[in-house]
Amino acid sequence: MPKGTLLSRRALVRGACAALAAAGAGVLCGCNGPDLADRLSGKDAGTEPASGSTFAFDTYCTFTVYGDDAALARLSAACTRYDELFNLYDEASDIARINAAGGARVDVDPATAELIARALEYCEQADGLFDITIGAVSTLWDFEEGVRPADDAIAAALPHVDWRGVHVDTDASTVWLDDPEAKLDLGGIAKGYVADRLVELLRDETGATAAMISLGGNIALFGTKPDGSTWDIGVRDPNDPGGSTVVGRAHLAEPLSLVTSGLYERTFELDGVTYWHILDPRTGMPVATDVDAVTVACPSSTMADALSTTLFVAGSAQGASIADEHDQTGALFLKQDGTSAGSARWQELTAFESGA
């Protein structure tokens, strides 16, 4: 899709998750249920992959692995470990301990230090559109119970949102905050980081030859399927929350990562107003944007995760320009006016097929 090309979502043929039963097919940011593993099974050149799932990061994590059935248990165990490290709401997690330390240095797992260091790089690049200290505000909201904080509470928390006050020593694995009232929230990047680490685990510590890892709306691919066919990933229609409708399918010849951020993930309605969980670090409110969902494709799942949030906050026009600044990166914007737009490299990277 050339830059600026628009497609009417109303003109796209809608497909269901059941249609993704072909080998290695998956739904990006859709069908977050334990039965997804059944739909991900298939036969490639006489080889049937092993499929499994676990619950972590507040979503179902599913795995389809070729060449090493035992890798499934390794992947599940790794997800549990990372969830325990990065869970903002678990008092024993590294992130919660940093937030509770009042600015003191905190000894953390090397993975936590690495994640925060990587996240700070993306914060700097995003120029205010992505900030891992959004926790000062995000913890005031409760999207499960439908709690909207008062305007004065948001205003009081906003001065504590500033990634520049976060410091990490990766050699010593310590983290500290300049502002005792600042709070980290790694929700906009942690799953991408984990997906990259799971790919490394498969490559370095198992006999797997190829795999699809799905952590909710984060999909990371490893290797080439036995028959050499593409990885086919459905992009869910954000106008079908919790459903199985897709707007099209990406056909990936290379083991890239696809990550989606969308309004449909966590929302609630209060007094006739709908609120969604993606907050603007500059206002502390759900972001005002012209898109319903953004899907990013690039080799790094960590980068794709951070970028999907950044581009969502930026909106389709600025977001496409930001995506184009990164090599081997493409983005698809599903807009609120019923159209879609791809960045310059989206079609080249994904061979996206509308309504497929």
Image (cartoon, rainbow, N blue to C red):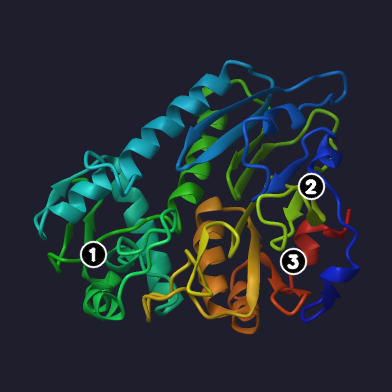
Based on the displayed image, in which of its 4 quarters is residue 158 positioned?
A: bottom left
Q: How many marks?
A: 3
- Note whether 291 is above or below 107 in the view shown: below
- Judge the density around disc 2: few (<14), some (14-19), many (≥20) Cα neighbours within 10 Å: some
**Which residue is located at x 68 percent, y 30 percent?**
35
- At label 3, the amino acid type is Trp
For mark 2, what is the residue?
253
- At label 2, the amino acid type is Ala
**Which residue is located at x 49 percent, y 27 percent?**
76
Between the residue at mark 2 and the residue at mark 1, the CA separation in whole angstroms equals 39 Å
Query: Is the C-beta separation of discs 3 and 2 under 8 Å?
Result: no
**Which residue is located at x 33 percent, y 55 percent?**
116
**Upstream in sequence: badge 3 or badge 2:** 2
- Judge the density around disc 1: few (<14), some (14-19), many (≥20) Cα neighbours within 10 Å: many
**Which residue is located at x 77 percent, y 27 percent?**
41
- Note whether 132 is above or below 32 in the view shown: below
Tell me if 233 is positioned left or right of 7 in this view.
Answer: left
**Residue 329 in view, yes or no:** no
Circle nearer the viewer, 2 or 1: 1
Between the residue at mark 3 and the residue at mark 2, the CA separation in whole angstroms equals 14 Å
For mark 1, what is the residue?
166
